[in-house]
Each structure stands twice: as structure tokens, then as C-alpha cells.
Image (cartoon, helix red, strand yellow):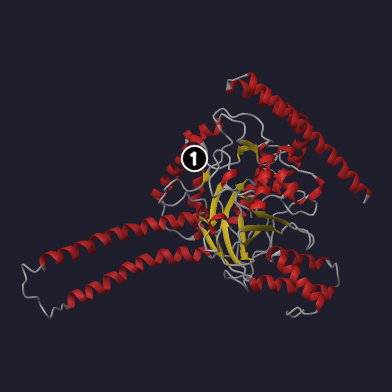
Amino acid sequence: MAETADKSQSLAEEYYVNDKQTTVVEKAVEVKEVENPKVAASEEPVAEKTVEETTPVAPAVAQESSEVTPPPAEESTEEQSSGNVEENSGNEDVAEETPEIKLETAPADFRFPTTNQTRHCFTRYIEYHRCVAAKGEGAPECDKFAKYYRSLCPGEWVDRWNEQRENGTFPGPL
Amino acid sequence: MGLLSCFRSTVLRKCSKGSSGMSRFLYTNNFQRNLISSGGNESYYGYFNRRSYTSLYMGTGTVGGITSARIRVPNVGCEGFMCSSHLSITQRNSRLIHSTSKIVPNSEIQNITTEMVKTPEVSRWMDQVIPTIAPCDAAEPWQLGFQDAATPIMQGIIDLHHDIFFFVIQIGVFVSWVLLRALWHFRSKMNPIPQRIVHGTTIEILWTIFPSVILMFIAIPSFALLYSMDDIVVDPAITIKAIGHQWYWTYEYSDYNNSDEQSLAFDSYMIPEDDLELGQLRLLEVDNRVVVPAKTHLRVIITSADVLHSWAVPSLGVKCDAVPGRLNQISTFIQREGVYYGQCSEICGTNHAFMPIVIEAVSTKDYGSWVSSQVN
């Protein structure tokens, strides 16, 4: 808890510093607009200033980007594999991974091949709660089903179903 | 809607102050904005992160950025002659593709339409001069034909229309010729006493079999395209939920949630005409755009919270009804980066004309940085 608080404070401080920088930039832009009527002349110094501002942040961001981005060969192989996906394929990352975000979602289910996915959402929700009932709360096997129903079901529906489950009036077979 | 629209427009007005630099071709500094960039404070989505998006970490003010590439593209629709030139080049390129394309199965449509991304040398040179202007796919004034295709499905629809229209013109001319000839040769001056019984077995057989053959040749590519739209063989990488309300759209990205309470959800209201900036499109701009990665299989789940709506984006070739209590799914694969406009296409009340849809297709890196800025 304390660590997260410290992180939030540091991030807030960085944010405030960024605010001041932008205000300075705006003032400079306004002054130059008044002084120099020529557009081309005024554009270059502004561009240079933006470059100068980004340089202190650039090395860290460059490092992060180097870590995040895999080689292009892997990207090309991923694209090829996505083109050749078979019918029985499971979850596949169509795009690259980031340290925080993984581009994956609920797979297509051949029990529900049509446009109507209402029962698909309902079934995924029931599967998750059956898994929780069978293997206990917080089981790692059930996280997959939780991700599936969260991807497919609107938030309002899930809230309503959670409320019905607590009241014991949920219509599905749990 | 008025009060909330004022609030949204206020947010947008504050966002415009974060612009930096001056365009060589656009004599104002209000157009170029950093849509998705590493400089968090100037990010287009950074401001909305604090106010508009209902996020679990709404108040922290943290704006994360992963990519170091600073993308400076116009925030607004088509503006000036540059975007029009780029659009015309895109159209020319699209016509070149169409002249050699045929109706092929779904797996081959992608191979044909990937050439859509290639641009001629002139456009490539222009992209070096103006590397940041994204193509803006909205209808031109009084446009009668299709918008430029951004998905294989839309390219297939355009090709099918052009092929069938060729037959339609021929059949129309032929039938008109037969009708006018009959009117001329059987007029009352030449035939004062009309024939009472006229029958010909041969011509009956001919005008029954030939239309059947023509309809068969029209139906085969049409059914092939229709069933390729419902292709669910490929697992999608991203699921977006579009929920229609009176009179706005709500979008949810729930692939990145760790609990039921946490959600990347935002409302997408139209920018009123009074708050439009120069170059923005009337009745089409929204305050929060749907950001998706290009060249990625998407699943869009469409539903409604109150009355019937329809989620339609012409450039993507998608149109799907939003029915309350039902989840309709469409799959799409956007081939090129850009901004695509659509509108609600099912009459839903007084403000049916004022709930537009704006989809912004970006690269995968930029999409990752956008999601990071929202989820953090």
C-alpha cells in the first residue's frame, strides 16, 4: 500500500512538471507568433524546442521500446501464422506482446457459430461459476473462463447477473 | 444531452491547447496534435484519461507511454487540399487494384487487398513531406458511390457491385429495347385491330431459361461473399463491445480487466456543431474515438440498452443491428491505418442523426500505448 502511494505521488509530481513545461511552450509559441509573421520561420524553432524537450525523456523511452518490440522476423512469422490458422486453433497472439497488455481475447466457439452471441456470453458466465464452485475461489484454472465472459458480456449484464446470483434468483444452472 | 455535450466540448477545448508546433501547410497551430505519443501530457488521450474514461485509476493523472515515436496527425477530419490529394491518390490506387481484382474466396481477398496499403511514388514522397496526415474516410459532399474500402469485405462488396452493375446495365438496355420496339411496331396506326391470341412456345422457353442462368451467375459470387462475412475460423485478437444508447454509443474493452469492477469503458458523444473546429466534419466527429489496431482480427459485439440502433461504418463494410437483450457479433480486419466514420443506421428517436461512430485504426504499438494509458 505504501509503495503504491509513493509511486502515485511520484507520478503525480512528474505530471505537474509536465504541466508547467506545456504552459511554457504555449507562451513561447504565442510570443513567436506575434513577433514572426512568417510561418516557415516560426515553425522550425518550435520543432527544435519540441525535439529538445523530448530528448531527456528519449533514452528511457528508447530503452522501453527496445525491450518491448521483438525483432521483425517474429512479427512476420506471427502474421504468417495468423494467416494459416486452423479450425482447431486455440488462443494465438496475432500481434506482439507488451509487458502489460496481451492482445488476446475469448476464442471463437463452434457451439455458437452465428451472429447471435447472447448464449455464448451466458454460457461462458455459467462455466466460470461452475468452475469456481468445483475448484474453489481463486483457482488458477478458472481465470481463463473469467477472462472469456468478461470479454464477451457487457458490464451491465454482468452486474445484473452478479446481483441475481447473490439474491439466489439467477435463472441459469450453476 | 446539452449539459453533457457542453462538458465534453469543454474537455475537447482544453485538449486543443496541448498542440505543439506549426504546420507548414496549415496556417494555424490548432490542428496538429499528438494523438498517441510518449510525451504523456500532450497526448490526445491523456486529457480524456482524466475526465472522460471511466477507469479504476481515474484520479491518478498518470499517462503512460511505451513507444518513442511521436505521431503527429490531425485530430480532425479531412482538412485542406493535402488530405484531399491523399484521398484522391488512395482512390486512384484503389481503382488500380479493382481493375485486376475478381471475386475470390475469403482467404484470397486478403492477398489482393493487401496491395491496398501500397501507395505510388508520388504519395510516398508526399508522405515524407507530410508523414503524419492519416487518410480520413468520410463521404465527400454529394458522394454517390462507395467510400474507399479498408477491409477485405468492403473491397469484395465494391467488386461485387461493379460486376453485377455491368449485367444490370446490359439487361436494362436490352429490356428497354424490346419494350420500345413492341410499342413502336404494335401501335394502333399499323394495327387497328389488335391480336387476341398470341402465343409462342419457343420464346416462352427462352425467356424462362435465360433469366434463370443470369440469376445463377449473379448468385454464385454473391453467396460466396455473404458466407465469407460470417467466417469465424480465425480467432480474434481483440473484442470490442458497442452498446447503443439514446443517443450515444458506449464502448467497452474488457480483455484487459482483472475483475468485474475494472473496465475500460467510455461514452462517445457527437461534438455539437457549435463546438466544431475548422476542418472537423459536421455531424460526424465524436469526443472519444474507438481506437483499434490495424492488420488485426477484431470482434465487435453490438447490443443496445434501450431501443434498436445499428452500428454501421461504410469504409469497413459493416452494418449490424444493436438489439436490446441480444449480442450480435461481427468480425472485421482493417487493412490500413486511418480514421473511419459511420453513423447509426436504425431510426432510434429524435437524435438518430446525431450519434456518429468514429474508428481510428493505429499501429499495434500505438494501440498498446493507448491501452496502457487507459488501464493504468
Q: Quadrant of residue B355?
A: bottom right
Q: How many marks?
A: 1
Assess disc 1: are there few (<14), some (14-19) or many (≥20) residues with their C-alpha within 10 Å of its C-alpha: some
| Three-letter code for the amino acid on which mark 1 is drawn | Thr
What percent of the width, then of the height, locates residue B120?
47, 37
Residue B302 position (above or below residue A174): above
Which residue: 75% across, 72% down? Answer: A161
What percent of the width, then of the height, locates residue B344?
54, 59
In the image, farthest residue toward the top: A35
Residue A130 at least partly seen: no
Which residue: 63% across, 45% down? Answer: B363
| Foreground residue among A20 and A79 | A20
Locate the N terminus of chain B and report the quarter of the image it occupies.
Answer: bottom right
Image check: B250 left or right of B160? right
Image check: B107 left or right of B243? left
Which residue: 74% across, 80% down? Answer: A173
Q: Secondary structure at mark 1?
A: loop
- What residue would you read off at disc 1? B119
